[in-house]
Image: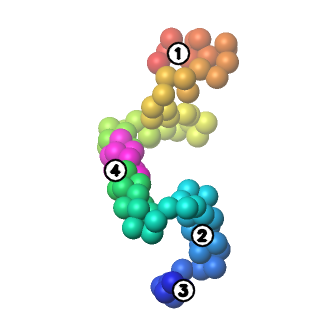
Amino acid sequence: MVRVPHDVSQPELDLAGRYINDNFRGWMIEDVRRELERRIEKERSEYDRLMSSVAQLYQSGALATKDEAAEVFVEGTANLVSSENDTERLRQL
């Protein structure tokens, strides 16, 4: 039995249960706790870095546009080219 806060929904519990079962089947509970702490901290750090990058883009005006179809690439040079027709767009960048 596990006590769960009242504000956690059944779908959230189901998702958490699947995650734990898929990733930690056969583990000792103390090892699960340590690994979850490590993964949570890693995800938090990555999220903080991403949000910092987005904030910098926003503050520099990179996200301001009149053209709603404009694209912003945060990382990954592979994302810059989706077809051979992107050569001119890359030249402009």
- From the image, tell me which residue sits under label 3: 1
Segment tinted magenta in the rendering: 43-53
From where the camera sits, is residue 47 visible? yes
Pick whichever, 92 or 37, lies toward us: 37
Distance of mark 2 from mark 4, alpha carbons? 24 Å
Q: Which comes before the other along the chain, label 2 or label 4?
A: 2
Quadrant in which the N terminus appears: bottom right
Left or right, 59 with respect to 82, comes to left
Check disc 3: other Cα within 10 Å, few if <14, some if 14-19, many if 20+.
Answer: few
Q: Quadrant of residue 86?
A: top right
Q: Taking 70 as reference, is 3 above or below it? A: below
- The label on residue 45 is 4
Mark 3 secondary-structure assignment: loop
- From the image, tell me which residue sits under label 1: 90
Q: Taking 64 as reference, is 21 above or below it? A: below
- From the image, tell me which residue sits under label 2: 17
- Tag 2 and tag 4, C-beta contact below 8 Å: no
Count all numbered tags in the image, as a single digit. Answer: 4
- The three-letter code of the residue at mark 4 reads Ser
User: Residue 87: percent from the left, percent from the top?
Assistant: 59, 11
Q: Nearer the viewer, mark 3 or mark 4?
A: 3
Left or right, 32 with respect to 48, comes to right
Distance of mark 3 from mark 2, alpha carbons? 13 Å
